[in-house]
Amino acid sequence: MPKQLPEDSVGIVEPQWFRHEQPLTLQCGKTLPRYELVYETYGQLNADRSNAVLVCHALSGHHHAAGYHSANDSKPGWWDTAIGPGKAIDTDRFFVVSLNNLGGCHGSTGPKTTNPDTGKLYGPDFPIVTVKDWVISQKALMDHLGIPQWAAVVGGSLGGMQAMQWTIDFPECVRNAVIVAAAPKLSAQNIAFNEIARKAILSDPDFHGGHFYEKGVYPKTGLILARMLGHITYLSDAAMREKFGRELRDGSISFDFDVEFQVESYLNYQGEVFSKNFDANTYLLMTRALDYFDPAEEYNHDLSEALRRARANFMIMSFTTDWRFSPERSEEIVTALLAAKKNVSYADIDCPQGHDSFLLDVPRYINMFKAYMGAIDI
């Protein structure tokens, strides 16, 4: 029997597709002759089209941000904690658009789709994409939907970087930007983490230079290792200690190299699930987009000069135990916004869960998020 859906859920939702027939020249110099974006919407667009909110996803995210695809789904979309009736992004007030970015592996044009020039899957031949490319493609979707201006562009981590890029590249199109657990550019340490993850995939014998589709295999071990490494950085030491401690899975030491500790079991499970649901070529593309993000580069490496173009109001949020994108990185954004004389609110939320806090139902975070979104005039 289908389960009863929560009252604060957006309910059963269906993906939609936008097909853009015009060529898109990417920052890397290559051109996509056409592309498709898969997206979902929640809530209703009001009469004057002033209540639209764009949700941008992080590295492994996708278009399914809220609700369920069927009543039998085991869990809702990835940001269901924040999107729905009465939630932070209140679908009784806002019309929410959530999409899967170019290069993704959940329906949008990417390595797993057909290259019109060859009739085969793009695979590793899909061009490198950047945050700027994503924003341009998102703008095309915005125009297709007939939305003149976003009430807000919202995102966590890599999603927050897209929100920031929107305010620079299309300043007239964004009234508010909510940037959570993000950074103005990656540190050398973060680039290093991404390189190790990519190397795990590239060195897997089943990767076949990215042409693994026609071989009927995929780089499972490489993807598992990449996810395990990434997942460690998304959690804080305190969160891992509280959740796992040094507990043994079977209660006693076995004196071998099999999985013994609960934390080992957890990471192996997360890696296994991820390897079945995410494309290796897409993982390479997404981490490179992270590496290349640096909106200040075009403005003599002056972030305040880049953000001077923005017309939006900003809400910046960070988490005390996030060491992947530490509060100091959010404070760099705040400092640049103040120097550019922009309206900015900032909250550093004390919670133990680390970088992944932006996905969780942390009361202080959700209440601040809700208060800011609730004050937006539509």
Image (tube, rainbow, N blue to C red):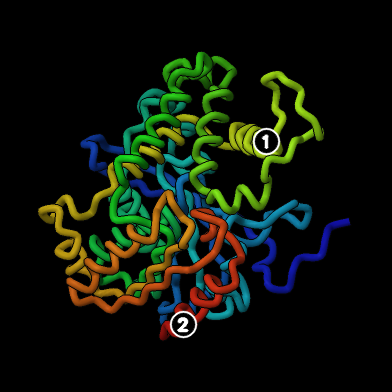
Could you say which quadrant of the image residue 6 lies in?
bottom right
Q: Which mark is residue 231?
A: none
Residue under the image location 18 percent in, 65 percent down? 304
Crowding at label 2, few (<14), some or many (≥20) Cα neighbours within 10 Å? few
The quadrant the C terminus occupies is: bottom left
Q: Which residue is mark 1?
A: 269
- Residue in the image at 53% along x and 22% along y: 213
What number of labels is visible? 2
Q: Amino acid at mark 2?
A: Ala
For mark 2, give the secondary structure: loop
Q: In which quadrant of the rendered view does residue 195 lie?
A: top left
Q: Local crowd at mark 1 within 10 Å, few (<14), some, or many (≥20)? A: some
Q: Nearer the viewer, residue 260 or 55?
A: 260
CA gap, disc 1 to disc 2?
A: 47 Å
Residue ID for mark 2: 47
Q: Position of residue 49 (x, y in %)?
A: 42, 77
Q: Residue furthest right?
A: 1
Residue 325 in the image: state x and y as whole percent. Answer: 40, 53
Labels 1 and 2 touching (C-beta < 8 A): no
Percent x, y of residue 293: 29, 48
Classify 40 as above or below 49: above
37 displayed left or right of 306: right
- Secondary structure, mark 1, is helix
Foreground tag (1 vs 2): 1
Q: Is residue 351 left or right of residue 49?
A: right
Location of residue 49 with respect to 196 vertically, above or below = below
